[in-house]
Image (cartoon, rainbow, N blue to C red):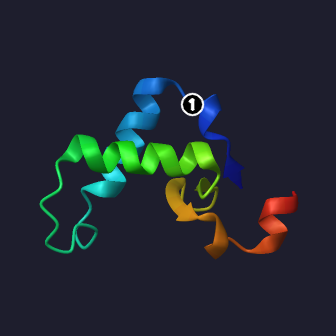
Amino acid sequence: MLIPHALLEAETLTRLIEDFVTREGTDNGDDTPLTTRVARVRHALERGEAVIVFEPDSQQCQLMLRRDVPAEWLTD
C-alpha cells in the first residue's frame, strides 16, 4: 500500500526520512550531513521519484524509488 507523503504530519515524515537515511548500509561512507540527506529524500518524494510503502502484515513503512515499486501498486 502506498502512502502519499503529503498526508503525513511534517514531524512524522521527517522522522520516517531520518530513520531511512540513518539505517546501517544507507550511507556507504558518505559524510553528507543528515539535514542534506533528509532534504534529498524529501525532494525525491515531492518529485514523485520516491514513494512511501506501508506493509500491513509487518506494520512497517519503507521508502522506495518509484521505479522499484511493482506496477500494480501504483495503479491501486
User: Is residue 53 or residue 47 the one in the foreground?
Assistant: 47
**Residue at 17% over, 66% down:** 30
Judge the density around disc 1: few (<14), some (14-19), many (≥20) Cα neighbours within 10 Å: few
Please, is residue 28 above or below residue 50 in the view?
below
**Residue at 31% over, 56% down:** 21
- Left or right placement of residue 43 versus residue 14 in this view: right
Q: Quadrant of residue 1?
A: bottom right
- Left or right placement of residue 1 versus residue 5 in this view: right
- Residue occupied by mark 1: 8
What is the number of callouts on the image?
1
Picture quarter with the C terminus: bottom right
**Residue at 27% over, 45% down:** 36
Q: Type of residue at label 1?
A: Leu
User: Is residue 13 or residue 49 the one in the foreground?
Assistant: 49
Please, is residue 38 above or below residue 22 in the view?
above
Label 1 element class: loop
Name the outermost residue toward the right: 75
Q: Position of residue 51 (x, y in %)?
A: 60, 54
**Residue at 13% over, 72% down:** 29
Q: Position of residue 22 (x, y in %)?
A: 24, 56
Q: Quadrant of residue 16?
A: top left
Q: Position of residue 9 (x, y in %)?
A: 52, 24
